[in-house]
Image (cartoon, rainbow, N blue to C red):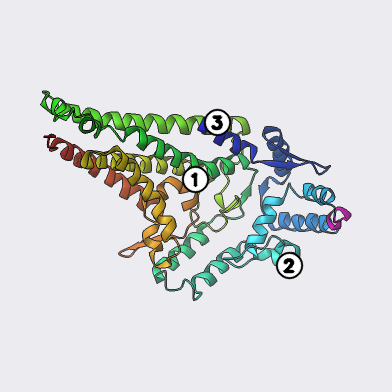
Amino acid sequence: MAIVVISYFAIGSIEYVDSSGNSHTGITAYNRLKEVKNEWKGNITESVLQEVLEENNKIKSSEEYLSKNDTENNIAYSRGQGFSDIKDMINRSFCDFQEYDYYRVDTVTPTELGNFYSNRIDNLKKWLSSDSVKDNYTKQEKEYLVEKYEEMQIPFYYEYAGAWTSLLYYLPVLIMLIMLVGTFLISGIFSDEFRLKADSIFFSTVYGRSKAIRSKIVAGFVCITAIYWISICCFSGVVLGCLGIDGANCLIQTSLGGWKSFYNITLLQKFLLTIIGGYIGVLFMSTLSMLVSAKMRSSVLAVIVPFVILLVPSFLSDFSVLSKILGLLPDQLLQISSSVNYFNVYQIGSKVIGAIPILFTIYLICYFILLPLLYRIYKKSELNS
């Protein structure tokens, strides 16, 4: 049911405004929106940007745009839907790094458009040297970020990718839900014998302290894995099946919110990182839950611990001094689609690396450490008197 609801929101969140000013949502709206947006499909060159400015100025000077009637305003808006994504990129390019002005495109002149791509690098350099963050990064980390920006292949290729942006927006919600439901289902695997006073029977069997424990661990792994991949495949299949896979190879910098990311990856690669990272995160959290269940003999605590781990970062996010630590907490694995937009970089010796590969490495290692630890703790459990 949850997959159906989230899929409904993912598809229904796409809105198209027709030439009469009426709004439409759903699959039909997506197809009509794709049609007008793909009229601008191709490399975003200076000539394309010039054309966007010309069209935007025409709309801005139209009677419908200047009208105080909402329907008339919607009609004016409908005429600019096709290039709205490119217009948004212009706004981001010509605003300061930490600012966004929806109307900035209205004051950009044709001669300024030659700085469209260079502004992205210049704005980053200004931000890194600003008083608010200049001490948050080492010299090598700053050079790394600038280098990643300069490595970006230009001009950007644009194609409407509404299906991928909607899918990636709702994926973290589904992944966190899977984690919470999964840990609830497996929370009693290692504590139920003690709760039901059956531990003496369980551990007195021939394989009670060996194969039986391994079977419990495997059962937890299979349960979590099945729930995760069935849910992800169903959700992704419904959204992409209904909306298509157009725009999969577009850079994430061309999508909403991705303009400033220093990860030079496509939307498809971002999707793969999101679901793989989510799986690693769910495996780690579920194994941690089983460990708590085995150690504390409480299914309630086994459910609470992962939930608390998810909540803690939100309470500490205002402390900038903790940003490096917060960037490596397991909750980041459950929301990779958002994490790729954060400027979390780490210096190890002379090498600088982004948070994503570190997160994958740390929690994969932690997962394989927790497995034998879980086995050892439960094997050495003392019987109830």
User: For this view, does 375 lie left or right of residue 347?
Assistant: left
Badge 2 crowding class, 10 Å Cα cut-off, few under 14, some 14 to 19, many 20 or more, is few
- Residue at mark 3: 4
Depth check: 25 or 361 in front?
A: 25
Q: Earlier in the sequence, mark 3 or mark 1?
A: 3
- Image coordinates of residue 271 in percent, x first then y, are 49, 42
- Residue at mark 2: 111
Front of the two marks 1 and 2: 1
Q: Tell me the distance, in whole angstroms, between the alpha carbons under discs 1 and 2.
A: 34 Å
- Which label is found at residue 134? none
Badge 3 crowding class, 10 Å Cα cut-off, few under 14, some 14 to 19, many 20 or more, is few
Q: Tell me the distance, in whole angstroms, between the alpha carbons under discs 3 and 1.
A: 23 Å
- Image coordinates of residue 80 in percent, x first then y, are 76, 50
Front of the two marks 3 and 2: 3
Question: Residue drawn at (80%, 54%), measured in percent from left and top?
Answer: 55
- Residue at mark 1: 270
For badge 1, the amino acid type reads Lys
Q: Earlier in the sequence, mark 1 or mark 2?
A: 2
For badge 3, the amino acid type reads Val
Depth check: 170 or 378 in front?
A: 378
User: For this view, does 185 lie left or right of residue 212?
Assistant: right
Front of the two marks 3 and 1: 3
Question: Residue drawn at (35%, 53%), measured in percent from left and top?
Answer: 358
Label 3 secondary element? helix
Label 2 secondary element? helix
- Indicate whether 105 appears above or below 230: below
Extreme top residue here?
Answer: 206
Q: Earlier in the sequence, mark 3 or mark 2?
A: 3
Question: Residue drawn at (57%, 56%), measured in percent from left and top?
Answer: 259
- Image coordinates of residue 135 in percent, x first then y, are 42, 73
Label 1 secondary element? helix
